[in-house]
Image (spheres, helix red, strand yellow):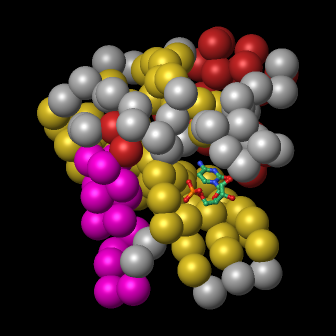
Amino acid sequence: MREVVAGAVISAGRLLLARRTYPPEVAGLWELPGGKVEPGETRGGALERELAEELGIEVAAGEQIGVGVPLREDLSLVALAATLVAGDPRPTEHSAVCWVDADALRQMAAAGELVPADAVWLDDLAGLLT
Ligand code: C5P
């Protein structure tokens, strides 16, 4: 069983979202950025590494947010809160990033602009932003 860890990075009351480029089913949709936990890594360590690699930011990983989401039989997704420590996100694998408040997040969810797995956390995420 492998895990994907996604980060709810909050800075100045806004949440960081990143737009995926693959696979085709979710290309163009927005997600909490993250990636797979490697053997021997903690969830928090994996998140901090992935966000440094993908966005060039330093974050401090915190508590789990919401429920875990099964992605496939052998893969599940968890979200961790994270605070931005240093850097300005510059995507290397995503096509764009944006910072949203609770209203903008809800509008994007209603418009179907979030990846389906992450939309499960809408109320948890909006709660962090209000
Ligand atoms: O980013 P990566 O390709 O490593 O993600 C692995 C899987 O996790 C993909 O199926 C992706 O769609 C999913 N994922 C997700 N929500 C995220 C991050 C990844 O559903 N926030």
Q: 113 or 61: nearer the eye?
A: 113
What residue do we see at 25% from left, 38% from top? Answer: 57
Q: Residue 128: x and y, percent?
A: 50, 33
Q: Residue 39: x and y, percent?
A: 39, 85
What residue do we see at 62% from left, 63% from top? Answer: 77
Membership of 113 in magenta stretch = no
Q: 47 or 82: nearer the eye?
A: 47
Q: Which residues are magenta?
A: 39-53
Q: Quadrant of residue 48?
A: bottom left
Q: Main secondary structure of the magenta part?
A: helix
Residue 81 is left or right of residue 58, and the answer is right
Q: 104 or 72: nearer the eye?
A: 72
What residue do we see at 78% from left, 43% from top? Answer: 24
Instruction: Decide if residue 121 is in sight here.
Output: no
Q: Quadrant of the N terminus?
A: bottom right
Q: 52 or 76: nearer the eye?
A: 52
Residue 43 is left or right of residue 87, and the answer is right
Looking at the picture, does residue 55 appear above or below residue 97? below
What residue do we see at 53% from left, 27% from top? Answer: 95
Q: How many marks?
A: 0
Q: Residue 55: x and y, percent?
A: 34, 38
Instruction: Decide if residue 63 is in sight here.
Output: yes
Residue 83 is left or right of residue 101, and the answer is left
Ligand 1: image quarter: bottom right
Membership of 44 in magenta stretch = yes
Residue 127 is left or right of residue 11, and the answer is right
